[in-house]
Image (cartoon, coloured by chain):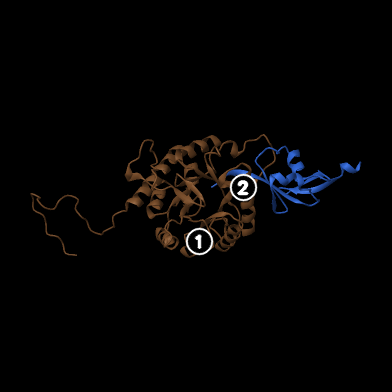
Chain colours: A blue, B brown
């Protein structure tokens, strides 16, 4: 196994998920297929604006929330 | 100068139905109904009901993306965000911490789509899952934190006038007392508390917006709230779960307009005894003497 295939575990919406070492929050959103979709991202309880997702490097154990809008009153 | 805002006007409205728009949280809204987007049978039905209600402001909730299908439908595919100002809520939050997080996530979502609603929030901090009544301590704390963070905060509250006053003092853009528990359809349970809320919040500040949020069951509840002098009504379930939601949406529009006009018109005082509408002079028959009282 080469070094660049190493993975870390982050928590996405309460579920553990493996991502490659060096991934950013933007990489994760893109890998999930949600790059162009309505989505807001929080990493460790801090909102990361869309423009900064590509700069937000993930670390093992990071807790991410990926949220959207739904119907509500 | 009052602007004509007759609910149905297309031509020049009568002077008798002129009204001001609803100004709240930096927004100017043509309709005094704020309508929720939850619990409709379909997105298509929701779209039709929003149209029929005449609203230009709709609430939305913030939830985890299920991440199942990026091509799946999103409510934003069915809401004309150039037409409606979105009001994101913090529904489902039981702590001030969670409510602040959700408010910030909602702001990010709305900024991303360029909707003016990014700068405000409908704050809910719930205290109890059975009643969905607000936790006043958490609500006060979250209000202070969100105001400090630059939000216009529209606060779901109980109808407690003292809490209402505290929320306004903290900088809430609007206090939104519940008529009765969320989704209960019980209408306005304590009109006198709402009257005192209105007095406390509007005394020396008559333009301070007060919106009844929650509890509406049918059109007369909306009219009754508006007749008390509240500035608007926020509702969801009463339309979405009516047997005919589209017809109820139209009824809510009419009721909101009727109640507002009746408030502006000024109702007659209630009296215990009758006052004849026809002249008492010139009656051809015998009229019994009045009983003294």
**Residue at the extreme front of the image, as rendered:** B1
Between B196 and B276, the one nearer to me in the picture = B196
x, y (%) of residue A34? 70, 39
Q: Between disc 1 and disc 2, whose residue precedes?
A: 2
Asked whether the viewer can see residue B193, the reply is no
Chain letter for the residue marked with disc 2 in the picture: B
The disc placed on residue A35 is: none
In the picture, the quarter occupied by the N terminus of chain A is: top right
Disc 1/disc 2 C-alpha distance (Å): 25 Å
- For disc 1, the marked residue is B168
Q: Is residue A66 left or right of residue B51?
A: right
Point 66% across, 43% down: residue: A39
Image height check: is B76 above or below B217?
A: above
Secondary-structure class at tag 2: strand
Q: How many marks?
A: 2
Q: Which mark is nearer the camera, 1 or 2?
A: 1
x, y (%) of residue B162? 48, 65
Q: Quadrant of residue B112?
A: top right
x, y (%) of residue A68? 64, 44
Chain letter for the residue marked with disc 1 in the picture: B
Image height check: is B15 above or below B140?
A: above
Secondary-structure class at tag 1: helix
Between A54 and B55, the one nearer to me in the picture = A54
x, y (%) of residue B256? 40, 46
Q: Is residue B209 left or right of residue A19?
A: left
- For disc 2, the marked residue is B62
Image height check: is A31 above or below B129?
A: above
Asked whether the viewer can see residue B159, the reply is yes
């Amino acid at each position: 196994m080469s070094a660049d295939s190493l993975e870390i575990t982050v928590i996405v919406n309460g579920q553990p998920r493996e991502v490659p070492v060096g991934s950013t929050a933007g990489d994760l959103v893109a890998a999930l297929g949600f790059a162009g979709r309505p989505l807001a991202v929080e990493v460790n309880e801090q909102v990361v604006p869309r423009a900064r997702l590509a700069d937000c490097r993930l670390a093992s154990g990071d807790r991410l929330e990926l949220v959207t809008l739904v119907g509500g009153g | 100068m009052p602007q004509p805002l007759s609910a149905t006007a297309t031509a020049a409205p009568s002077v008798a139905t002129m009204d001001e728009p609803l100004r709240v949280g930096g927004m100017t809204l043509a309709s005094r109904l704020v309508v929720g987007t939850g619990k409709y049978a379909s997105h298509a039905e929701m779209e039709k009901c929003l149209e029929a209600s005449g609203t230009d402001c709709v609430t939305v909730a913030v939830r985890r993306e299920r991440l199942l299908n990026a091509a799946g439908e999103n409510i934003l595919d069915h809401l004309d965000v150039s037409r409606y100002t979105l009001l994101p809520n913090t529904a489902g939050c039981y702590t001030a911490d969670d409510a602040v997080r959700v408010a910030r996530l909602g702001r990010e979502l709305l900024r991303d789509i360029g909707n003016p609603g990014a700068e405000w929030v409908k704050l809910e901090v719930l205290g109890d899952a059975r009643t969905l009544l607000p936790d006043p301590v958490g609500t006060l704390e979250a209000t202070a934190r969100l105001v400090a963070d630059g939000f216009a905060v529209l606060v779901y509250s109980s109808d407690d006038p003292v809490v209402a006053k505290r929320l306004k003092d903290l900088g809430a853009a609007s206090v939104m007392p519940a008529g009765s528990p969320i989704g209960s359809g019980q209408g306005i349970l304590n009109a006198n508390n709402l009257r005192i809320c209105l007095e406390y919040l509007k005394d020396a500040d008559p333009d301070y917006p007060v919106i009844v949020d929650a509890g509406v069951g049918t059109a007369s509840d909306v009219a009754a709230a508006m007749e008390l002098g509240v500035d608007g009504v926020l509702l969801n379930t009463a339309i979405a779960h009516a047997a005919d939601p589209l017809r109820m949406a139209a009824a809510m529009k009419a009721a909101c307009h009727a109640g507002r006009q009746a408030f502006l018109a000024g109702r007659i005082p209630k009296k215990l005894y009758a006052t004849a509408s026809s002249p008492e002079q010139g009656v051809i028959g015998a009229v019994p003497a009045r009983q003294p009282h």
